[in-house]
Amino acid sequence: MVAQWQVVAPIEPNLLDFFHKLAAPLYDQAAANRRETRRLVALRDDLLPRLLGGEIEVADAQEVVHA
């Protein structure tokens, strides 16, 4: 079965290096975005119940976010 698979290999020897140079910043940005999303989710999960419960006010929450 595997012997029947066709694999396309780039003709240009530096094509993979070229692609990597173009794509690496995109992958890095995607990873940074995932980290930021996790941080924001944690802040939301921490602050929202406290805000809704009246335990803290918006000004207090801003201090927590900027700390």
Image (spheres, rainbow, N blue to C red):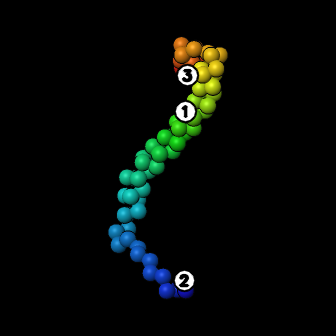
Q: CA distance from mark 3 to mark 2?
A: 54 Å
| Residue 36 appears in the figure | yes
Q: CA distance from mark 1 to mark 3?
A: 9 Å
Picture layout, residue 59 above or below residue 33: above
Locate residue 65, reporting x and y percent.
Answer: 55, 22
Picture layout, residue 5 above or below residue 36: below
> Of the residues under marks 2 and 1, which one precedes in the sequence?
2
In the image, 29 versus 47, the foreground residue is: 47
Q: Which residue is mark 2?
A: 2
Picture layout, residue 14 above or below residue 56: below
The amino acid sitting under disc 1 is Leu
Viewer-side label of 2, 1: 1
Q: Which residue is mark 1?
A: 40
Q: Which residue is mark 3?
A: 65
> Of the residues under marks 3 and 2, which one precedes in the sequence?
2
Tell me what residue is drawn at x 54 percent, y 83 percent. Answer: 2
Locate residue 30, reporting x and y percent.
Answer: 47, 45
Q: CA distance from mark 2 to mark 1?
A: 45 Å
The amino acid sitting under disc 2 is Val
